[in-house]
Image (spheres, coloured by chain):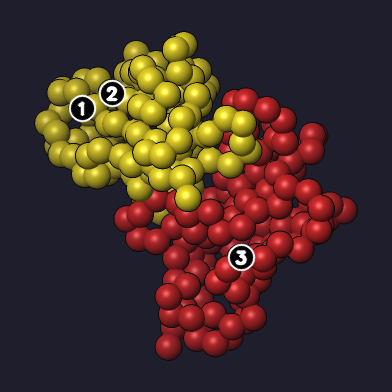
Chain colours: A yellow, B red
């Protein structure tokens, strides 16, 4: 089956610094990837749609200057949390979307803790 | 826009008992329906999906879900649960059209706890 990896699985950073999270599709090409955020004991909230070779599309209420998304290749999308603050602490999950396909494959998630 | 309602935030059951996790959705267009399972500190795994055809869909580990268009429901059932089924279960919908319209809308999740 299709495999999606995320790196790192867990990161701790200090307030004010930036952190980059990678999402890779290991055995398929993904023209579209999605980034989700999950707060403890809550559902996933879609943050943005990442399209290879073009700008990401952000959901309403998500700060595009704070959450920078780059989909530089058909197998890699990155999410950079800039000037992180404690309220950015969360579980970030990506999914990759093979084309043509209706089904998304999810990464294992990255837990970000901002101190 | 679509929305998903999972009526129960927590469902405790005893091992080998049957269980039903409820899911209702709202959409103005045709949708695909999914159930995902999330074990602690892990990502989501697809449990089963409804795309078209038979309204009853099954997973390899004994779960099944039935699409009921008139009631806009997609409840998840298992006749006999195991301790290992303890997890968070998410119901999700997407438009059944192409490209980024496949983005998922999730329910708030149901924590299934199976007790010995």
Q: Chain of mark 2?
A: A
The residue closer to the viewer here, B34 or B107, is B34
- Give the CA separation, mark 1 to mark 2: 6 Å
- Give the CA separation, mark 3 to mark 2: 36 Å
Q: In this picture, is B111 found above or below B52?
A: below
Query: Residue at horizontal 36%, vertical 26%?
Result: A77
Query: Residue at horizontal 41%, vertical 39%?
Result: A27
Pointers 1 and 2 in contact (C-beta within 8 Å):
yes
Does label 2 lie on the same chain as label 3? Answer: no
* Spot occupied by residue B18 in the image (x, y as percentages of width and height): 62, 81
Q: What residue does disc 3 label? A: B59
Identify the secondary structure beneath mark 1. strand
Q: What residue does disc 2 label? A: A80
Category of crowding for the residue at label 2, using alpha-carbon neighbours closer than 10 angstroms: few (below 14), some (14–19), many (at least 20)? some
Q: Given the current orientation, which residue lies at the most extreme right position?
A: B70
- Give the CA separation, mark 1 to mark 3: 38 Å
């Amino acid at each position: 089956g299709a495999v999606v990896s995320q790196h790192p699985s867990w990161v701790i950073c200090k307030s004010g610094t930036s952190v980059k999270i990678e999402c890779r599709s290991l055995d398929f090409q993904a023209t579209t990837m999605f980034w989700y955020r999950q707060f403890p004991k809550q559902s996933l909230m879609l943050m943005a749609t990442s399209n290879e070779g073009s700008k990401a599309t952000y959901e309403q209420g998500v700060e595009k200057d704070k959450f920078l998304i780059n989909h530089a290749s058909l197998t890699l999308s990155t999410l950079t949390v800039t000037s992180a603050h404690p309220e950015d602490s969360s579980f970030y999950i990506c999914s990759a979307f093979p084309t043509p396909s209706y089904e998304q494959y999810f990464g294992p998630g990255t837990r970000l803790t901002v101190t | 826009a679509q929305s998903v309602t999972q009526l129960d935030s927590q469902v405790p059951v005893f091992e080998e008992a049957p269980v039903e996790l409820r899911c209702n959705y709202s959409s103005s267009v045709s949708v695909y329906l999914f159930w995902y399972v999330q074990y602690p500190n892990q990502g989501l795994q697809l449990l089963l999906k409804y795309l078209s055809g038979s309204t009853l869909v099954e997973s390899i580990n004994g779960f099944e879900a039935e699409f009921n268009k008139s009631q806009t429901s997609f409840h998840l059932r298992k006749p006999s649960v195991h301790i290992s089924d303890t997890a968070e279960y998410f119901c999700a919908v997407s438009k059944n059209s192409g490209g980024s319209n496949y983005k998922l809308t999730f329910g708030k999740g149901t924590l299934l706890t199976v007790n010995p």
